[in-house]
Image (cartoon, rainbow, N blue to C red):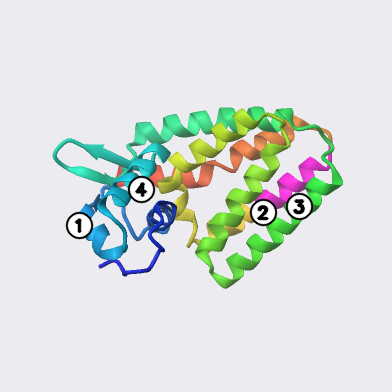
């Protein structure tokens, strides 16, 4: 049973709360999002609930089916592979466009984000881990200088939320992730964009492999 929380009647807060439930596994892939249940949880109008579901559908984390309503998106193995093919292409290209060595300001900003990320890992704060991880990548890729490319990367990051979520509570995967982040910072200090690009692609593989193993063996 979902808890009732006062979100101030704002559509954006409903979207954020439901997205967080999906990220942290409280709403599993395929779970139905019933309007009456959501109305009991959030003190908002039915119109606001419908608009929030529409926004989640636009983000790619919710789907709608005729006579079934809205549900948390369930990714098939083919969808996972295709999404990650696009993520790899986008992130590789962005990494190749970053001017190296990166500025001291960017290195310091990423180092501070990594410190925050490490702190959240040690304390087990899942929301902090998720937000620091996304902030690290979007900050780094923003250095490519192409806002449209960065927006595309962010879009496909959201599409892969069900895949990425499996790493949040797994200490071994988190340790690998933060090692990769540290290696990216070191690569940014040097002049070889291809090394940075390959790190960005390799970083995507553990979560993808684990998710595919889980759904294909299930």
Instruction: Look at 75% across and 31% down and name the residue there.
Output: 193
Q: Secondary structure at mark 1?
A: helix
> Mark 2 to mark 3: distance in Å?
17 Å
Q: CA distance from mark 2 to mark 1?
A: 44 Å
When asked about the image quadrant of residue 44, the answer is bottom left
Residue 178 image point, x, y percent: 64, 55
Image x and y of residue 51, in percent: 33, 45
Closer to the camera, 97 or 54?
Answer: 54
Number of numbered discs present? 4
According to the picture, the residue beneath numbered tag 2 turns out to be 179
Point out which mark residue 52 bears. 4
* Span shown in magenta: 179-190
Whether 159 is drawn above or below 135: the answer is above
Is label 2 or label 1 in front? 1
Q: Earlier in the sequence, mark 4 or mark 3?
A: 4
Spatial separation of the CA atoms under disc 1 and disc 4: 14 Å
Q: Is residue 68 left or right of residue 179?
A: left
| Residue underneath mark 1 | 36
Number of other residues with Cα within 10 Å of mark 1, as a class: few under 14, some 14 to 19, many 20 or more:
few
Residue at the disc numbered 3: 109
């Amino acid at each position: 049973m979902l808890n009732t929380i006062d979100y101030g009647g704002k559509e954006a807060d409903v979207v954020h709360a439901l997205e967080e439930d999906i990220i942290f596994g409280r709403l599993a892939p395929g779970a139905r999002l019933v309007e009456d249940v959501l109305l009991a949880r959030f003190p908002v109008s039915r119109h606001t609930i419908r608009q929030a579901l529409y926004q989640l559908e636009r983000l790619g984390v919710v789907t709608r089916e005729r006579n079934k309503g809205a549900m948390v998106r369930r990714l098939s193995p083919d969808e996972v592979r295709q999404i990650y093919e696009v993520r790899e292409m986008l992130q590789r290209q962005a990494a190749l466009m970053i001017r190296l060595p990166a500025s001291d300001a960017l290195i310091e900003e990423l180092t501070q984000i990594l410190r925050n990320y490490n702190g959240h890992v040690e304390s087990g704060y899942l929301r902090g881990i998720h937000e620091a991880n996304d902030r690290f990548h979007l900050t780094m890729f923003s250095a490519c200088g192409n806002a449209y490319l960065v927006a595309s990367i962010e879009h496909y990051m959201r599409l892969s939320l069900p895949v990425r979520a499996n790493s949040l509570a797994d200490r071994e995967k988190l340790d690998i992730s933060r090692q990769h982040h540290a290696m990216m910072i070191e690569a940014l200090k040097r002049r070889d964009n291809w090394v940075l690009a390959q790190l960005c692609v390799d970083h995507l593989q553990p979560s993808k492999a684990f998710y595919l193993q889980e759904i294909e063996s299930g």
